[in-house]
Image (cartoon, coloured by chain):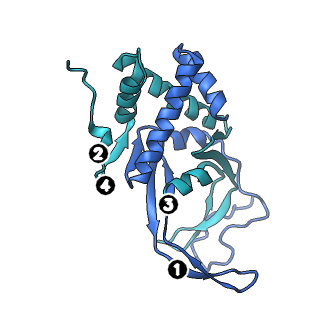
Amino acid sequence: MNKSELVEKLAERAKITKKRAEQVVNLVFDQMTEALKRGERIEIRGFGSFTSKAYDAYTGRNPRTGETIHVPAKRLPFFKVGKELKERVDYPPGAAPRLDHSLELSSSHDSDDDDDDDSDD
Amino acid sequence: MADGTPTNFSSEVVGKTLTKADFVESVYSKIGGLSRRDSAEIVDLLFEAVKETLSRGEPVKISGFGNFVVREKKARVGRNPQTGRDIEISARRVLTFKPSQVLKDQLNT
């Protein structure tokens, strides 16, 4: 779903014009951008939170050419998904695909309480 | 004339947290013809539409802001750091956010 599809969906559900829905969508995301620019946190209950982290400048290296490059100080935005959305996005309890057979559990560990071996007949 | 226009979202105090109430106030004050109650409902519907789409595993791409994408993580073997025993970490779907270049540039101007 992109922004115009979100606008359409919002217009339909809120029973408002597309123009108005577009204003709302732009307003909300612009307001989030402005808050992050000011270094503020955003917390949307049931959805998640946004923060921005400041990074110091450092001297890095282009791994391909070996050339030394200066990476300036920067701020980057981060999103942490909220509990409700995290659960809605994930598989329902018990429905997750199981581990691939090619991966084995605890073969390299000398735990002597390996008590799950079937007792034959 | 008391129009109830809030001023809280114009403050520049670092450490402030923007919440849904702030969105509601700006929708109410900047878009004409909506009651506060309408504004609150519209803001809720907006986030609900986004959540619903993501819950179906579909990405939500907001140009100029960023992309919310659901990623499938395969089951893998992890280790309980307390006991040192191997455990299965089940397959899961997780939500990731990739900020757009526009947003990243905005934060650095």
Q: How many marks?
A: 4
Query: How much space separates mark 2 and mark 3, taking CA atoms?
Result: 20 Å
Amino acid type of the residue tagged 4 in the rendering: Val
For chain B, what colour was chosen? cyan
Amino acid type of the residue tagged 3 in the rendering: Asn
Bin the neighbour count of mark 4 within 10 Å (Cα to Cα): few under 14, some 14-19, many 20 and up: few
Question: Up-down: is A63 above or below A51?
Answer: below
Q: State the residue at coordinates (56%, 38%).
A: A88
Label 3: which residue?
A: B108
Dot 4 and dot 1 within a common chain: no
User: Which type of secondary structure does the marked residue at label 2 adopt?
Assistant: loop
The dot on residue B14 is 4
For chain A, what colour was chosen? blue
Residue A2 on image: x %, y %: 66, 35
Residue A96 on image: x %, y %: 66, 46
Label 1: which residue?
A: A58
Q: Which of these two is toward me, B59 or A88?
A: B59
Label 2: which residue?
A: B11
Dot 2 and dot 1 within a common chain: no
Amino acid type of the residue tagged 2 in the rendering: Ser
